[in-house]
Image (cartoon, rainbow, N blue to C red):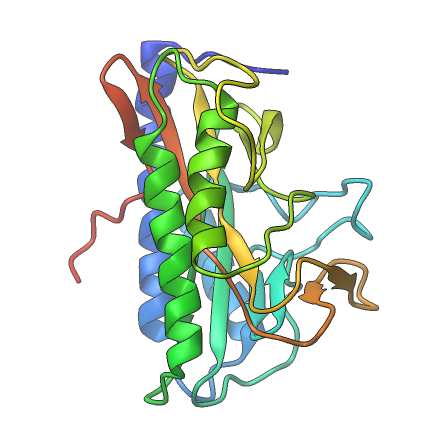
Amino acid sequence: MIEILSASELTRARAAGALVANILHTLKSRCTIGTNLLDIDAWAKDMILEAGAVSCYVDYAPSFGRGPFGHYICTGVNDAVLHGLPRDYALADGDLLTLDLAVSLEGIAADSAISFIVGDTKPAESVAMIEATERALRAGIAAARPGARIGDLSYAIGTVLSEAGYPVNTEFGGHGIGSTMHQEPHVANMGRPGRGYKLRPGLLLALEPWVMADTAQLVTDPDGWTLRSVTGSRTAHSEHTIAITQDGAEILTLPTLGS
């Protein structure tokens, strides 16, 4: 299913996007050495429910997971890059943490992810990897405009990641979003320009470049959800929900809270 949102639905999408971004912004500010991943999940739950929103994750049970997910946010540490199931783990200095959050507000969903390093130790390789996913995300957003093809976005994202020296996995990537979290079209993080669905105003996409330092292969944890690099190398993930407008792409998941 591919949805094209009306003007009123786009207004709701902006509110959902701001909520997701503000929750992630707040969670990042609270994540320090010793913070437990289960506390992060509890904080996310409180903020989602306080806003009158609905978690897209708690009851999520796709074919690739051991569902339902049962938590409010994905928390990936170091080699865990996607679908990180919150667990009893206290963050250590230098940990690379990824937070991925999707909520629905008044019937419209928004999805975003951030990666950052906890504490004062900032390994250069980890910083570079996070920055590469952020550059790739900006490139994908810049390519998103009416008349462009999904392959144009995939090509822009993949070019940045490949030039930075990272292998690219195309099994999991970006996706359409709207009244539900995961919709068509799939937006792979590598592709050929000029191919795929033609973008139209009103289309919402969640673009999410993610990489593993030295592999494109994933392994699933015994929890049935958490995806890690098969080599144990570090990982990073950046994601925004965008709306295609007549003028290009509007980023919906930017925080409105102060720094």
Which image quarter holds the N terminus? top right
The image shows residue 161 at horizontal and vertical percentages of 47, 52
Asked whether, in this view, residue 119 is left or right of residue 175, the answer is left
- 119 left or right, relative to 216: left
Q: Quadrant location of the C terminus?
A: bottom left
Q: Residue at x 79, y 49 (%)?
A: 67
Residue 105 at least partly seen:
no
Nearest the camera: 33 or 231? 231
The vertical placement of 68 against 212, above or below, is above
Above or below 165: residue 178 = above
Residue situated in front as seen by the camera: 48 or 120:
120
Q: Vertical placement of 142 versus 74: above or below?
A: above
Image mark count? 0
Which residue is depicted at the point 44% across and 24% down? 204
Which residue appears at 36% of the width and 67% of the height?
28
Residue at the (71%, 53%) spot, across then down: 69
In this rendering, the answer to whether 41 lies above or below 252 is below
Determine the residue located farthest toward the left in the rendered image: 258
x and y percent of residue 117 in the render?
40, 76
**Residue 159 falls in image quadrant:** top left
Q: Is residue 199 left or right of residue 80?
A: left
* Residue 127 locus on image (x, y percent): 37, 73
- The location of residue 104, given as percent across then percent down, is 49, 35
In front: 163, or 199? 163
Instruction: Report if residue 250 is visible in the image.
Output: yes
